[in-house]
């Protein structure tokens, strides 16, 4: 994900450096790809939120970070679309800006958001890889997953190993008893 976002950021920067003489041709394909990625990331977030990933250690924190990154991608897509509008508004309004300055400002914001989103996705992938490579961490996650599965099977409140009444580590996170958790052998975290 991070390499894709970095490539799109480079495209945004290339357009931003030019005159943006053909804003629809130059920016619409980028905006469309970004909107598509934002939708894909939101779908993945929804899937991860009801998977084993949510009950792994720091699962809710990781989901919150992924939600933020998805929002950054969506915002970048919107800023690209807005840059098209700012560059073409001279055709609609007499007092429209004939220079590409406003569009460049929008594209600068889009590029900054893509940098932040790429860093978040890279950090998440690194964190998950490290966790999966560690036998003690994998064992801990397997215990958390087993406890969540047991809580779904028997919704009576439980208190042990960081799980309090079906909650994983975070008092602000949603109860895991309300979400269906797939069997432990189903790999779901690989969608990162």
Image: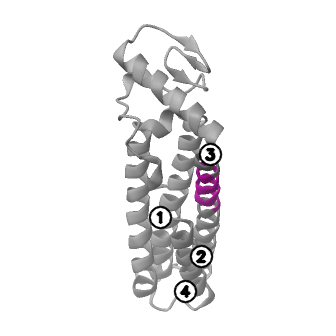
- In the rendered view, tell whether residue 62 sits above or below residue 77: above
Pointer 4 with pointer 3, Cβ within 8 A: no
Q: Nearer the viewer, residue 17 or 50?
A: 50
- Residue 116 location, x and y as percent? 64, 61
Instruction: Report helix, strand or loop for mark 3.
Output: helix
> Which label sits in the foreground, 1 or 2?
1
Q: Which range of residues does the magenta coloring cover?
A: 119-129
The residue beneath circle 2 is: 102
> Which label sits in the foreground, 1 or 3?
3
Residue 78: give its label.
Answer: 1
Q: Residue at x 61, y 60 (%)?
A: 122
The residue beneath circle 3 is: 131
Q: Is residue 165 magenta?
A: no
Residue 116: give its label.
Answer: none
Q: Is residue 92 visible?
A: no
Q: How far is disc 4 from disc 3 in space, using C-alphas?
A: 52 Å
Q: Residue at x 65, y 61 (%)?
A: 119
The residue beneath circle 4 is: 98
- In the rendered view, tell whether residue 32 sits above or below residue 70: below
Q: Residue at x 38, y 23 (%)?
A: 178
> Which label sits in the foreground, 2 or 4?
2
Q: How far is disc 2 from disc 3 in space, using C-alphas?
A: 44 Å
- Residue 39 location, x and y as percent? 38, 57
> Which label sits in the foreground, 4 or 1?
1
Q: How far is disc 1 from disc 3 in space, using C-alphas?
A: 34 Å
How packed is label 2: few (under 14 Cα within 10 Å), some, or many (20 or more)?
A: some
């Amino acid at each position: 994900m991070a390499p894709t976002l970095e490539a799109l950021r480079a495209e945004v920067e290339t357009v931003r450096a030019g005159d943006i003489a053909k804003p629809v041709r130059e920016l619409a394909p980028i905006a469309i790809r970004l909107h598509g990625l934002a939708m894909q990331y939101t779908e993945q977030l929804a899937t991860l939120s009801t998977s084993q990933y949510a009950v792994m250690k720091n699962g809710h924190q990781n989901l919150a970070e992924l939600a933020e990154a998805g929002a950054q991608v969506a915002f970048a897509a919107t800023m690209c679309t807005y840059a098209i509008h700012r560059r073409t508004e001279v055709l609609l309004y007499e007092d429209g800006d004939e220079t590409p300055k406003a569009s460049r400002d929008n594209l600068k914001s889009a590029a900054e958001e893509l940098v932040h989103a790429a860093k978040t996705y890279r950090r998440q992938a690194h964190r998950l890889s490290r966790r999966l490579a560690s036998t003690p961490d994998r064992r801990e996650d397997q215990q958390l997953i087993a406890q969540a599965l047991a809580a779904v099977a028997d919704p009576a409140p439980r208190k042990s190993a960081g799980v309090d009444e079906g909650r994983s580590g975070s008092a602000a996170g949603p109860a895991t008893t309300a979400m269906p958790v797939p069997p432990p052998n189903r790999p779901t975290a690989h969608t990162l």
